[in-house]
Amino acid sequence: MKLQEYTKKRHFALTPEPSGEENVRRQRNGPFIYVVQKHLASHLHYDFRLEWRGTLLSWALPKGPSLDPAVKRLAMRTEDHPIEYANFEGVIPADQYGAGTVMLWDRGTWQPDDADVEASLKKGEIKFTLYGEKLKGSWVLVRTRGFGRNPGGSAWLLIKHRDRYASTEDVTEEEPRSVATRRFLADIARDERGDVEKAAKGDPSGEARLSSSTRTVPKRSRKPPKKQ
Ligand code: MN
């Protein structure tokens, strides 16, 4: 719907991200796409996206989602993304917007409680059900005041509702792999010529993962050990 901001920030000759040109303006009654992308850019965050009227409504969660209804997770509203972005996993080159490694962390469909999502957005409260592989059940996104001074975005909170999918398990720690390829961030960076060392910092026990990931890197890219 409104991809101007998305398009303005990116150079599609240089980044593998979708341009949104193929975007079909779908006006469906559902099921709608839901996706979470784990993104190690300047800081690790989780991009939470919900299909609505031909684009993906997007929020960036610095700490990712929590299954614990007692935990509220900050979700900064970001620019709408094209529908095709829901399939993107890869590396954004170093000098491009959002540079770093992107993992398809979760995907599925979502259903708003109230069919008038536009009104919910305006009101600042969206209740919905997720049918993801990792995130399921009833959730709410609530806009907050008090985080203030956020040019280009507003602060929301993502909260799990109490249901049989609520849990105190740390889902980001317990389920760190790509839902599409089972890869870790370091694997994606290695496969797509990204910064493996940096990407590994977003994986659990980053140090341990790094040593196994770099094993397959060609010898010429390794620095010879220094002699004492
Ligand atoms: Mn991001």
Image: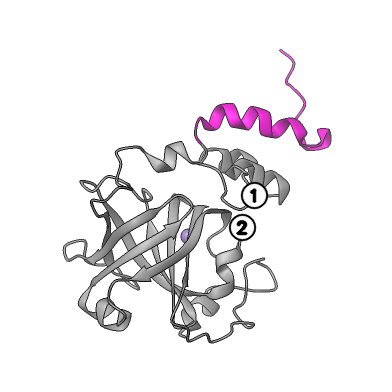
Asked if residue 225 is among those painted magenta in the image, a careful observer would answer yes
Task: Bin the neighbour count of mark 2 within 10 Å (Cα to Cα): few under 14, some 14-19, many 20 and up.
Answer: many
- Give the side of residue 32 with respect to residue 184, left or right: left
Q: Residue at x 53, y 33 (%)?
A: 206
Residue 40 makes an appearance in the image: no
Which residue is outermost to the top? 228
The x, y position of residue 197, in whole percent, is 61, 38
- Residue designated by label 1: 181
The x, y position of residue 158, in whole percent, is 29, 58
Q: Secondary structure at mark 1?
A: loop
Residue 141 higher or lower than 12, as above or below = above
Residue 69 makes an appearance in the image: yes
Q: Secondary structure at mark 2?
A: loop
Front position in the image: 114 or 214: 114
Q: Residue at x 61, y 57 (%)?
A: 89
Front position in the image: 142 or 30: 30
Q: Nearer the viewer, mark 1 or mark 2?
A: 1
Q: Residues in magenta?
A: 204-228
Q: Which callout, 1 or 2, points at the residue further toward the start of the chain?
A: 2
- The amino acid type found where label 1 is placed reads Thr
Q: Which mark is residue 89?
A: 2
Q: Residue at x 62, y 67 (%)?
A: 17
User: For the residues marked 1 and 2, what is the alpha-carbon distance in whole angstroms?
Assistant: 9 Å
- Give the side of residue 4 with respect to residue 100, left or right: left
